[in-house]
Image (cartoon, rainbow, N blue to C red):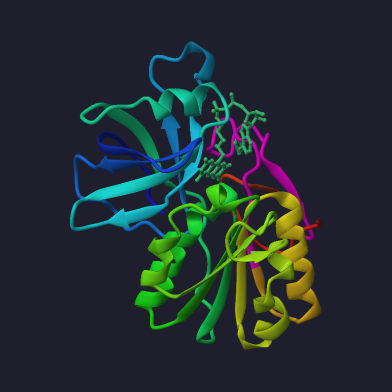
Amino acid sequence: MKKFIHDFEVTLNDKISNDCFVLYLKCPVSLPTILPGQFAEILVGNSSEAYLRRPFSIYDVDYQKNELSLLIKEVGKGTLALSKLKIGETLNLVYPLGNSFSIPPGNKALLVGGGVGIAPMLLLSKVLNEKGKQPDVLIGGRSKNDILEPEKYTVYGNLFVTTDDGSMGEKGMVTQHSVFAEKISEYSQIYACGPDPMMKAVAKVAASQNIPCEISLENTMACGIGACLCCVVETVDGNKTTCIEGPVFNTKKLIL
Ligand SMILES: Cc1cc2nc3c(=O)[nH]c(=O)nc-3n(C[C@H](O)[C@H](O)[C@H](O)COP(=O)(O)OP(=O)(O)OC[C@H]3O[C@@H](n4cnc5c(N)ncnc54)[C@H](O)[C@@H]3O)c2cc1C
Ligand code: FES
């Protein structure tokens, strides 16, 4: 798939929680098709300490407005600089990078996201909905503050929530949600993105039910173009780069 490099204009920098924000970015030319699970490498301007591009999943795409958005958690110097961007400033993106989630054969799919790991699930739920599928979205977090923009998912499917402290939805981890106990056999595919232990737990349940499962890995990246090999992951078919051959992998192929 062809890659592009463009200076996008910030049309909105929306702070949605203590440490998370959504950047809305307008493309100077017509946006190419962007598939769910793909990501962009962002040049964080004026930051000598963040000279390597930073990878972020494409959160949503609005082809009519010619905009895409990114859901970002502030964790270090690069994301702090991004959190301060103002309307009208520009941001250089290399995109769309990586592979994408597959479309399931059956009608019902379960999309599981933990914290900011939910980012690629919004575009996936939208695309599944457009293809006539029924996405159930399960979001997990430590507390309700980690459940980011839940209303956006209800446009495309059913929403379920778990929190560790019970402040929103069911109390406990995502795999303890009643969706897993009561509805799991309805799904023809499961997708997950978030902390490693969460993705491993989801993959384990999927394997036990013989349901195909795809996860999106967020390995640390440097070049983003397959050259430095710092994002390599072990699979049953040998080592694969997360930036080129991922970030989406079928869990049957991964050595977890
Ligand atoms: C394919 C892909 C998609 C991603 N999508 C998103 C997204 O949609 N939203 C989002 O907020 N983040 C996403 N990330 C993680 C994001 O790239 C990092 O949080 C970001 O690069 C940190 O930059 P920084 O300069 O602020 O942090 P740094 O100053 O470089 O590091 C600060 C802290 O963040 C940790 N960190 C750095 N890189 C990562 C990483 N890749 N994953 C987890 N922790 C990291 C470091 O270990 C360190 O503890 C994604 C990563 C990948 C590989
Ligand atoms: S980030 Fe360099 S090979 Fe993937």
User: Which of the 4 image quadrants contains residue 185?
Assistant: bottom right
The quadrant in which the C terminus is found is bottom right
Residue 79: give x, y in percent of width and height. 49, 29
How far across and how far down the image is residue 116, in percent?
A: 55, 47
User: Toward which corner of the image does residue 13 lie, by quadrant?
Assistant: top left
Residue beneath the point at 26% across and 56% down? 62
**In this orientation, does residue 70 appear?**
yes
Q: Position of residue 194 (x, y in %)?
A: 63, 52
Q: Position of residue 27 (x, y in %)?
A: 24, 42
* Residue at x 28% of width, y 27% of height: 86
Q: In the image, 14: left or right of 208?
A: left
The segment highlighted magenta reads 214-238
The dominant secondary structure in magenta is loop
Locate the N terminus by quadrant: bottom left
Q: Residue at x 19, y 44 (%)?
A: 29
Q: Quadrant of residue 6?
A: top left
Left or right position of 65 against 171: left
**In the drawing, does residue 190 fall left or right of residue 60?**
right
Q: Is residue 240 magenta?
A: no
**Furthest residue toward front:** 167
In reply to whether residue 233 is colored magenta, the answer given is: yes
Q: If the picture is divided into quarters, which one holds ligand 2? A: top right
